[in-house]
Image (cartoon, helix red, strand yellow):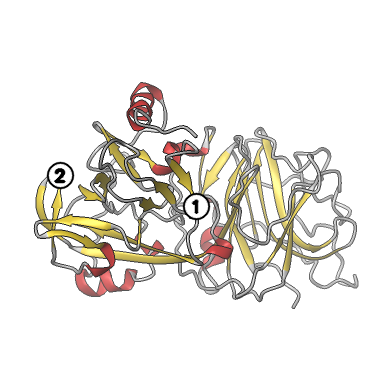
Amino acid sequence: MTLKAGDIAFVQFGAKDPDEFSFVAIKDIVAGEVIVFTDSGWTKDGAFRATEGTVTFTVPGGGLKAGQVVSWMSGSSTNPTGFSSPSSTNFSFNNSGDQLIAFQGTLTAPTALIAAIQTGDGKTEWNTDATNASTSAVPGTGYKSTDAVPNLALLTDGIYSVALAYSDDYFNPGLASSVTPSNSLSKINDKSNWTGINANQDTQSYDFTALCYLAGTHIHTPSGERRIETLAIGDEITTIDGTQRLRWIGRHSYPRAVAGPWVSPIRISTDAFGQGLPHRDLLVSPWHAILLGDVLVRAADLVNGSTITQIFPGTVAHYLNLEFDAPTVVYAEGVAAETYANHANRHMFENAAEYTALYGDDERVMIDAAGNNLRRFPIVFDGPRFQDALRRANAHRRYA
């Protein structure tokens, strides 16, 4: 099949080393379909400037389902199956502004334009022409109705593409995991739904990533440890704030073939934090936070190559998270770790409709008036408290 404008949409772009991007499938896409990504700009004359590189993604077996997000990161060993290496070192995002265009065909003979994003220049509009490596006209500019390639239609800004003012790193906080063709493009390519910062991506949380425990994790309860998948709403759980009843359990799964670095599990090996901590290997999603002292730290930030590593056991990662009346901390394989805090991202769970059926509009969003995400303990990404937490985490590190 040949893809067309709007079959995918970009939902994240980061130019603060490492380079990264994510896209969501707007429709089901069959296995074997090839999508090419380039940071080459599009000229006013209707062609790529073709001075930059490309990365190719071949949809793996099983295909992509509508609403499925795929992420790529430069230099990562855990990019999803199907991504090629960059065609040249010129595939590199400029942190003062750049563009990314998804298409089919080649740079010199494209056959379809699918999606595009541009950042930088301090203005929310595409350039009139591609005059250097960091500028681009709206992809499809210069296309004539008499041309022989019908899928080189204009990627209209706000419909099939989005141009954003700032540089370095962006994310779309309004993305639903179950997007549909009727509403997704208008939401994703609406500039007002995007947030941008000039900072490293570690200071942000993308709501299309997993924030959970892997199935099989043992959670402490007043009657002993239980596997997380055996728990049910109303069960009593031991928390840092005492015994509490479960309000809800969120679930979502990711096939290995499309699980990138923000989805593939982090394994905290037995005794990584000291004798019995954890007392079995603990597997959590990269963005799930561990309590170290009086701060939370993402599991991805604790990876040390020996006692804490990123792996993908099996063919599908089945994640679950626990929600209480307010965010708290539970004990997973003996380790203190966060519970679900609703940061307006419940839609990332496959069973979000179950919560609505139970509680209606009582979402209990944990965001304060200033827009800050609330947790039981503060989460840190850098600074002295972050470094202290890393030292605590690595105090019992074993070296090969």
What's the mark number on residue 240?
2
The answer to whether residue 351 is left or right of residue 175 is left
Residue 138: x and y in percent read 74, 53
Q: Secondary structure at mark 1?
A: loop
Label located before the other in sequence (1 or 2):
2
Q: Secondary structure at mark 2?
A: loop
Assess disc 2: are there few (<14), some (14-19) or many (≥20) residues with their C-alpha within 10 Å of its C-alpha.
some
Looking at the image, residue 200 lies above or below residue 247: above
* Corner quadrant of residue 65: bottom right
- The reply to whether dot 1 and dot 2 touch (C-beta < 8 Å) is no
Looking at the image, residue 93 lies above or below residue 250: above
Assess disc 1: are there few (<14), some (14-19) or many (≥20) residues with their C-alpha within 10 Å of its C-alpha.
few
The answer to whether residue 220 is left or right of residue 113 is left
Of the residues shown, which amino acid type is indicated by label 2?
A: Ile
Position of the N terminus, as image quadrant, is: bottom right
Q: Residue at x 61, y 50 (%)?
A: 21
The answer to whether residue 244 is left or right of residue 31 is left
Residue 119: x and y in percent read 64, 42
Residue for badge 1: 311
What's the mark number on residue 113?
none
